[in-house]
Image (cartoon, grey):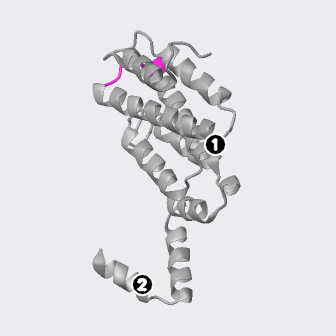
Protein backbone atom coordinates (compact mmCIF):
# COMPACT_ATOMS: atom_id res chain seq x y z
CA UNK A 1 0.00 0.00 0.00
CA UNK A 2 2.81 2.40 0.87
CA UNK A 3 4.56 1.66 -2.44
CA UNK A 4 1.33 2.29 -4.34
CA UNK A 5 0.82 5.58 -2.50
CA UNK A 6 4.35 6.70 -3.35
CA UNK A 7 3.84 5.76 -6.98
CA UNK A 8 0.54 7.65 -7.13
CA UNK A 9 2.15 10.74 -5.62
CA UNK A 10 4.86 10.65 -8.28
CA UNK A 11 2.47 10.53 -11.25
CA UNK A 12 1.96 13.52 -13.49
CA UNK A 13 -1.54 14.91 -14.02
CA UNK A 14 -1.90 13.26 -17.45
CA UNK A 15 -0.83 9.90 -16.00
CA UNK A 16 -3.38 10.21 -13.16
CA UNK A 17 -6.14 11.04 -15.63
CA UNK A 18 -5.19 8.03 -17.76
CA UNK A 19 -5.18 5.81 -14.67
CA UNK A 20 -8.62 7.00 -13.59
CA UNK A 21 -9.92 6.49 -17.13
CA UNK A 22 -8.52 2.94 -17.19
CA UNK A 23 -10.07 2.20 -13.79
CA UNK A 24 -13.44 3.45 -15.01
CA UNK A 25 -13.24 1.18 -18.05
CA UNK A 26 -12.54 -1.89 -15.91
CA UNK A 27 -15.99 -2.08 -14.36
CA UNK A 28 -19.33 -0.36 -14.06
CA UNK A 29 -18.81 -0.20 -10.29
CA UNK A 30 -15.57 1.73 -10.72
CA UNK A 31 -17.22 4.06 -13.23
CA UNK A 32 -20.16 4.73 -10.91
CA UNK A 33 -17.86 5.31 -7.93
CA UNK A 34 -15.52 7.72 -9.75
CA UNK A 35 -18.43 9.64 -11.25
CA UNK A 36 -20.07 9.89 -7.82
CA UNK A 37 -16.88 11.14 -6.18
CA UNK A 38 -16.40 13.78 -8.86
CA UNK A 39 -20.06 14.80 -9.13
CA UNK A 40 -21.99 17.46 -7.29
CA UNK A 41 -24.62 15.99 -4.96
CA UNK A 42 -27.40 16.69 -7.45
CA UNK A 43 -25.53 14.79 -10.17
CA UNK A 44 -25.02 11.53 -8.25
CA UNK A 45 -26.97 8.78 -9.96
CA UNK A 46 -28.96 7.66 -6.93
CA UNK A 47 -31.15 5.41 -9.06
CA UNK A 48 -28.12 3.37 -10.17
CA UNK A 49 -27.19 2.77 -6.54
CA UNK A 50 -30.78 1.79 -5.78
CA UNK A 51 -30.79 -0.62 -8.74
CA UNK A 52 -27.58 -2.20 -7.49
CA UNK A 53 -29.11 -2.60 -4.01
CA UNK A 54 -32.29 -4.08 -5.48
CA UNK A 55 -30.20 -6.50 -7.54
CA UNK A 56 -28.09 -7.51 -4.53
CA UNK A 57 -31.22 -8.14 -2.47
CA UNK A 58 -33.03 -10.25 -5.07
CA UNK A 59 -32.64 -13.72 -6.54
CA UNK A 60 -29.26 -14.26 -8.22
CA UNK A 61 -29.49 -16.92 -10.91
CA UNK A 62 -25.68 -17.42 -11.05
CA UNK A 63 -25.23 -18.15 -7.37
CA UNK A 64 -28.75 -19.51 -6.84
CA UNK A 65 -29.02 -17.25 -3.80
CA UNK A 66 -31.85 -14.93 -3.01
CA UNK A 67 -29.83 -12.07 -1.58
CA UNK A 68 -26.31 -10.90 -0.93
CA UNK A 69 -25.93 -8.73 2.16
CA UNK A 70 -22.15 -8.62 1.73
CA UNK A 71 -22.59 -7.02 -1.71
CA UNK A 72 -25.21 -4.67 -0.28
CA UNK A 73 -22.79 -3.54 2.42
CA UNK A 74 -20.08 -3.02 -0.21
CA UNK A 75 -22.36 -0.84 -2.34
CA UNK A 76 -23.35 1.26 0.67
CA UNK A 77 -19.72 1.59 1.77
CA UNK A 78 -18.74 2.82 -1.72
CA UNK A 79 -21.59 5.31 -1.72
CA UNK A 80 -20.53 6.64 1.70
CA UNK A 81 -16.99 7.09 0.35
CA UNK A 82 -18.30 8.80 -2.78
CA UNK A 83 -20.53 11.39 -1.10
CA UNK A 84 -21.31 13.02 2.20
CA UNK A 85 -24.73 14.19 1.01
CA UNK A 86 -27.04 13.08 3.83
CA UNK A 87 -30.17 13.16 1.65
CA UNK A 88 -28.60 10.82 -0.91
CA UNK A 89 -27.38 8.47 1.81
CA UNK A 90 -30.67 8.49 3.74
CA UNK A 91 -32.62 7.84 0.54
CA UNK A 92 -30.46 4.88 -0.47
CA UNK A 93 -30.41 3.40 3.06
CA UNK A 94 -34.20 3.65 3.30
CA UNK A 95 -34.46 1.99 -0.11
CA UNK A 96 -32.16 -0.76 1.19
CA UNK A 97 -34.29 -1.58 4.20
CA UNK A 98 -37.45 -1.50 2.11
CA UNK A 99 -35.88 -3.99 -0.33
CA UNK A 100 -34.76 -6.12 2.62
CA UNK A 101 -38.30 -6.03 3.98
CA UNK A 102 -39.51 -7.52 0.68
CA UNK A 103 -37.27 -10.52 1.33
CA UNK A 104 -38.92 -11.24 4.67
CA UNK A 105 -42.36 -10.79 3.14
CA UNK A 106 -41.56 -13.08 0.20
CA UNK A 107 -39.29 -15.71 1.71
CA UNK A 108 -40.30 -15.66 5.34
CA UNK A 109 -37.79 -16.34 8.09
CA UNK A 110 -34.14 -15.42 7.45
CA UNK A 111 -30.89 -16.39 9.09
CA UNK A 112 -30.04 -14.46 12.25
CA UNK A 113 -27.00 -12.83 10.60
CA UNK A 114 -29.27 -11.49 7.84
CA UNK A 115 -31.59 -9.91 10.39
CA UNK A 116 -28.58 -8.36 12.11
CA UNK A 117 -27.50 -6.83 8.79
CA UNK A 118 -31.00 -5.45 8.27
CA UNK A 119 -30.98 -3.98 11.78
CA UNK A 120 -27.72 -2.15 10.99
CA UNK A 121 -29.15 -0.86 7.71
CA UNK A 122 -32.25 0.34 9.57
CA UNK A 123 -30.24 2.16 12.22
CA UNK A 124 -28.02 3.81 9.59
CA UNK A 125 -31.10 4.86 7.62
CA UNK A 126 -32.46 6.57 10.74
CA UNK A 127 -29.12 8.23 11.50
CA UNK A 128 -28.86 9.67 7.99
CA UNK A 129 -32.53 10.72 8.11
CA UNK A 130 -31.91 12.67 11.32
CA UNK A 131 -28.90 14.38 9.75
CA UNK A 132 -31.16 15.38 6.84
CA UNK A 133 -33.63 16.81 9.35
CA UNK A 134 -30.89 18.79 11.12
CA UNK A 135 -29.99 20.27 7.74
CA UNK A 136 -33.52 21.66 7.57
CA UNK A 137 -35.03 19.25 5.05
CA UNK A 138 -38.44 17.61 5.26
CA UNK A 139 -38.05 13.99 6.38
CA UNK A 140 -41.72 13.02 6.40
CA UNK A 141 -41.39 10.61 3.42
CA UNK A 142 -38.26 8.98 4.83
CA UNK A 143 -39.72 8.73 8.33
CA UNK A 144 -42.97 7.28 6.97
CA UNK A 145 -41.06 4.58 5.07
CA UNK A 146 -38.94 3.79 8.12
CA UNK A 147 -42.10 3.48 10.20
CA UNK A 148 -43.76 1.19 7.64
CA UNK A 149 -40.73 -1.11 7.70
CA UNK A 150 -40.90 -1.17 11.49
CA UNK A 151 -44.60 -2.05 11.45
CA UNK A 152 -44.05 -4.70 8.78
CA UNK A 153 -41.35 -6.30 10.91
CA UNK A 154 -43.64 -7.08 13.84
CA UNK A 155 -43.67 -10.77 14.72
CA UNK A 156 -40.79 -11.59 12.39
CA UNK A 157 -38.20 -14.10 13.59
CA UNK A 158 -35.17 -13.68 15.82
CA UNK A 159 -36.72 -10.65 17.57
CA UNK A 160 -36.18 -8.53 14.45
CA UNK A 161 -39.36 -6.49 14.89
CA UNK A 162 -38.56 -5.83 18.54
CA UNK A 163 -35.08 -4.59 17.66
CA UNK A 164 -36.44 -2.25 14.97
CA UNK A 165 -38.93 -0.86 17.50
CA UNK A 166 -36.15 -0.30 20.02
CA UNK A 167 -34.03 1.48 17.39
CA UNK A 168 -37.01 3.64 16.36
CA UNK A 169 -37.75 4.65 19.96
CA UNK A 170 -34.06 5.30 20.69
CA UNK A 171 -33.78 7.82 17.85
CA UNK A 172 -37.27 9.23 17.50
CA UNK A 173 -38.18 9.00 21.18
CA UNK A 174 -41.74 7.88 20.63
CA UNK A 175 -43.64 4.82 19.63
CA UNK A 176 -45.59 6.49 16.84
CA UNK A 177 -44.87 8.20 13.55
CA UNK A 178 -46.13 11.64 14.62
Q: Residues within 10 Å of mark 1 (few under 14, many from 20)?
A: few
Up/down of 176 relative to 48, above or below: above
Q: Is residue 113 left or right of residue 147?
A: left
Label of residue 135 in the image: 1
**Residue depicted at x 37% and y 33%:** 117
Task: Examine the rendering and report whether any part of residue 139 can be seen.
Answer: yes
Q: Is residue 152 highlighted in magenta?
A: no
Secondary element under disc 1, as helix, strand or loop, is loop
Look at the image and tell me in which quarter the N terminus lies: bottom left
Instruction: Give the CA distance from mark 1 to mark 2.
Output: 36 Å
Up/down of 34 relative to 10, above or below: above
> In x, y percent, where is residue 119?
39, 29
Secondary element under disc 2, as helix, strand or loop, is helix
**Residue depicted at x 69% and y 33%:** 138
Task: Examine the rendering and report whether any part of residue 96 can be seen.
Answer: no
Q: Residues within 10 Å of mark 2 (few under 14, many from 20)?
A: few
Q: Which residue is mark 2?
A: 9
Q: Which is more N-terminal, label 2 or label 1? A: 2
**Residue depicted at x 38% and y 15%:** 162
Residue range corresponding to the magenta coloring: 104-111
Look at the image and tell me in which quarter the C terminus lies: top right
Number of numbered labels in the structure image:
2
> In x, y percent, where is residue 102?
51, 24
Q: In which image quadrant can residue 153 be found? A: top left
Amino acid sequence: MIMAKRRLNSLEKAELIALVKDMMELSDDNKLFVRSVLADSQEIDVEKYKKKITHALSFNIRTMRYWDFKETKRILRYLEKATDDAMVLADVYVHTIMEGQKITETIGDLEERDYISMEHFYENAIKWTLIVEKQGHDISRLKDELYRVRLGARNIGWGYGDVLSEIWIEYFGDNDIE
